Image (cartoon, rainbow, N blue to C red):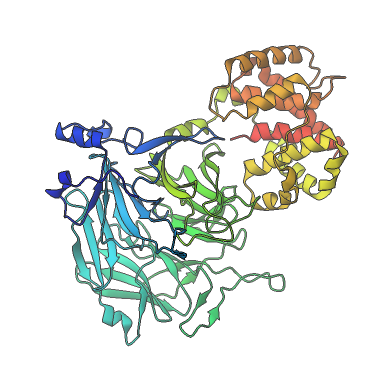
Amino acid sequence: MMKGLQSGFYAATFAASALVFHTASVAHTMSTGTIAEGRHGISTPETSSLFKRHVDRASGVVSYILEPGRFGHNQQSIYFTAKSMTDDGRFLLFNIRSDEFAVKNGKKVKVKSNMAMVDFKLDSVVVLTGVPGQIPFLDVREDKLYYIARNPDRLCRRDLLVDPTKEIVVCTIPKEELLAGGDHIGYYATHLTLTADRSRAFLDLRVDDRFIQGMLVLESGKFEKWSEVDHVINHGAVNPVDDQIALGAWEVDWTDQKGRHHPIPRPTKENPNVVYPRLTLLRPGVEPETVPPKINNYATHENWAEDGKGFYYCSNCVIYHDLATGRQSVIVPMDAGHAAMSADNRYVTFDSPDYAREGWYRGCSWNVCFWNRETSCGLYVHTLMPPLCPKNNQSNLHPDPHPQFVMNGRYIVCTLNERGRMNLSVTPVAPLIARTTPDPLREAHFTKWNDSESPGKIARNITARFISNVQPEQFSSGSAAVTNWFAAACRQADLSGVAFRRIQLKKYSSIWNAPSAFTHPFLVLAEKMSKTPYGVDADERDVALFRSYASKIVRSEDGGEWKGVSESPYFAWALVLGVRRGWIEPTKYGPAARRAWLAVVRSVAKKTGDPEANAAALWAANALNEL
């Protein structure tokens, strides 16, 4: 299972308990004192011999994948609330796990897990034997790893720059004091976090059926109790700037030691005013404060903004809560399961289950996305990655992508599921920013819409209209307009990522992503070229032909319309697409594309139920909403 094991070089430096991997070529270069070049003589995911280039088949986004299966069947990123890469770019933490579905003698083989790290200076992987499975805390500035170990119970540290295999006991945890006559401590911290000065660690421990929150003083091992509640509070995280406030979650239903089930309060049809109580602010000596999720009355997977001024959470979108004002606002208008915001709050990365197929389950298909808040543009980093496992045989390894920004926003790290494995993915962020920052010249003609002309609003309305009015059996009539309307609705649902639309469109799954019914050669060519990932150059011959068609079409345009030309309402889509993708000159064709868009807007306003008017407007709106 583990290839390329080399131990001779590290024997003199690291403890014998460590497993170290590197390639023969790297071993050779180490002996001559040279390594792959990167920042300050450190290799990078782009240059490391351990990583392979990966191009998303739909978006064209380039990532770098730790060679699949090289160090373990599953090579999984760390949970998104814990930083996994040091700011100097030298160390990247990940989990190695064996195949949980492996069977021997008719029985599943017990999963073996280890934490490991890539050392980019040595271009090698070190297995951190003895670091337990609970989520650790990585001091990204000082290159130190903190974690809680049991039996005996203690908080430990590894100094990665000195010897990552050597465990340093920071303090002993006062177990008996915390038990206070109880029988069992289930956990001390679900996600270990430390204060900004690294003097204390926040604990959200469970003792029997008691849930206790507070601080562990690292110098003395003394526990400072903040609060105690009668329901599960986990996901505890101290504010990265203010050590007098922490964020917690009433995450799930829970079962007590007597087997009694305790459901989390939820709004229902009978009682819709129940506040979903997940979001919890914790302070010393004060009753925990429930923060109502004001927009959708639902919340999941919260995280602090790095400036400590607020936190964000997922709720069929991503919402930011400002601590000072209590105001909540949508920062990403797409469905998200887990989200992470960059340190400067300008960008968000998030994952989203593929609700249109089998919905969410442990091991389902996912998208990983990047959102540019400054331009309100998004991009898929990994598109519809295949399921890790079938729905009737779900994973127990929490295989969600869990994307996060690392190295001061230089990369996004996440888990990429492919071919029954979890793979560690690292994606450079700079190209994502470039691709979600529209070219001002290309966009000059597609801004300053009034409310009735807004592409986003029109796309939402037309998709909802399709869901309400068109039934699957109508496709048997062979209507080209209905087919085109459906094809556009599917694209709009994928583009928006809004879960309820994808679920509502699921009844059309037998013809999902059906091709359009275009016959005009300009439209057939445009649809072919539209499948080229955004930011990737289209075939030169196709571009030349596209320009030839566009030139002829614009010469016969009359106020954004083409009299007597079959399928001409769809020219708006093709022209907008061509301008925004850079296939035709924006100064020459932009005004005509804008007029064509306004013409289809007028048409759909006059003929609300007409399939062709709706289809043409939705195709054009999708081109305007792309990215």
221 is higher (above) or lower (below) than 58: below
In the displayed structure image, the side of residue 565 where residue 73 appears, left or right = left
588 is higher (above) or lower (below) than 517: above
Quadrant (top left/top right/bottom left/bottom right) for the C terminus = top right
Q: Quadrant of residue 314?
A: bottom right
In the displayed structure image, the side of residue 402 where residue 319 appears, left or right = right
Q: Nearer the viewer, residue 123 or 153?
A: 123
413 is higher (above) or lower (below) than 441: below
| Residue 264 in picture, x, y percent from top left | 56, 73
- Of all residues shown, which one is farthest toward the bottom? 181
Residue occupying the point 54% across, 22% down = 537
Residue occupying the point 76% across, 40% down = 486
Q: Nearer the viewer, residue 184 or 244?
A: 184
Residue occupying the point 15% across, 34% down = 31
- Could you tell me if residue 41 is visible in this image? yes
- Could you tell me if residue 451 is visible in this image? no
Q: Quadrant of residue 262?
A: bottom right
Count of numbered circles in the view: 0
- Of all residues shown, which one is farthest toward the front? 105
Residue occupying the point 59% across, 50% down = 335
Q: Nearer the viewer, residue 347 or 180?
A: 180
| Residue 78 in picture, x, y percent from top left | 38, 53
Q: Quadrant of residue 174?
A: bottom left
In the displayed structure image, the side of residue 387 where residue 450 appears, left or right = right
| Residue 123 in picture, x, y percent from top left | 26, 39
